[in-house]
Amino acid sequence: ISVVVVYNGQRYELQVDPGDGAEVLKMQISSLIDLDSEKMLISGYGNGYIHDLSDLNGLKAGHVLTVTVGDASSIPPPTISVPQPSAQRSPTAGGAITREALSAALMAATKPKSQEEIERQRGIQEMQGRILSGAQHVMIYENPQVQAQALRVIPVDEIRRRAAESPGALGARDAVARKLLAWFKHECFKWVNNPPCDACGSGNTTNLGGAHPNSEERAGMAGVVEVYKCGACAAVTRFPRLNHPGKLMETRRGRCGEWANAFTLCCIAMGFEARHVVDWTDHVWTEVYSEDQQRWIHCDSCEDAWDAPLLYSEGWGKKLTYVIAFSKDDVRDVTTRYTRQYAECLA
């Protein structure tokens, strides 16, 4: 069903399955607004705030859930209602419930789970939330208006000219994708660690922490804002971590998340079939489908890396866990493409 999430005055539409439970819902919302689920209070359903054990089967399409910042651990668990045997009913009458049976049922319902089981369930629910969020996000790339935002920036004719003049060993279409990747890395996007001061342009800025996004920043799907102070003039600069690919093609700066997000949009806007790939540890990139080779090609816009899937596990020495590819058509576990040590990923 589709529900509405309201946070900091911004309304978001979210597809949820009430049967998945409250923890999955919280993970979905956490990914949507980029707020830690442990710092999230959700109201608008039932009495009080939604707890991890809340029954969501009464949630209906169009329901409005309001999110505020607070300590989720302070939310009391829902009360478990257990019917009591009537004083007028004989404990041995047909269909009657004995006190012993009620006691056993209550014990079974409230039996504590082991810490290992709790962590396992939490891990599963976190993965479900991230997958649902990723699957919803890639649909933005299919919006013609968002693609138009990219095409206003991409020098399409120039990239095709470069591909035609020096295709290398690639086919004509792959050469265009390869030149698009190089243009994006070297001429389009900029990497940002500490942003320069908005007031004087100095690069001597220091991180002061985070802040809530304002209305303009929320329009760019910023979940968090990093705040920096200039060492030269003491002015404060805000660096919203934007998540809308169209808006990113206006600002054209960020870190790996912003780079892969915007580059995936560029590929789709140029007519390529592309996937947004998430390394569960800490990196993001793109895959482009090669019609020339009839397979998916790894493209890392941060590194200008083309068809180098072992870059991370062998070049960087990373131990991967899950690598998931998202497209408008499906969600795929592509971990085996990026490591020769798959058994270690499962450990």
Image: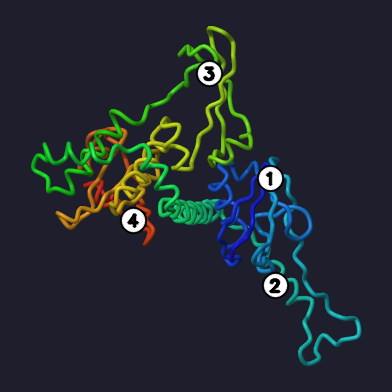
| Disc 2 from disc 3: Cα separation | 63 Å
Is residue 129 found left or right of 84 in the rendered image? left
**Residue nearer the viewer, 88 or 174:** 174
In the picture of the structure, the residue carrying the numbered disc 1 is 73
- Seen in the picture, residue 279 relative to 121 is either above or below; the reply is above
**Residue nearer the viewer, 125 or 162:** 162
- Callout 2: few (<14), some (14-19), or many (20+) C-alpha neighbours within 10 Å? few
- Callout 1: few (<14), some (14-19), or many (20+) C-alpha neighbours within 10 Å? some
Q: Amino acid at mark 1?
A: Ser
Looking at the picture, how far across and down is residue 213, in whole percent? Answer: 61, 34
Dividing the picture into quarters, in which one does residue 156 lie? top left
- Callout 4: few (<14), some (14-19), or many (20+) C-alpha neighbours within 10 Å? few
Disc number lying in front (4 or 1): 4
| Disc 4 from disc 3: Cα separation | 41 Å
The reply to whether discs 4 and 3 touch (Cβ–Cβ < 8 Å) is no
In the picture of the structure, the residue carrying the numbered disc 4 is 333
Looking at the picture, how far across and down is residue 193, in whole percent? Answer: 43, 23
The reply to whether discs 3 and 1 touch (Cβ–Cβ < 8 Å) is no
| Disc 3 from disc 1: Cα separation | 38 Å
Q: Which numbered marker is on residue 105?
A: 2
Q: Amino acid at mark 3?
A: Asp
Q: Amino acid at mark 2?
A: Ala
Dividing the picture into quarters, in which one does residue 318 lie? top left
Dividing the picture into quarters, in which one does residue 131 lie? bottom left
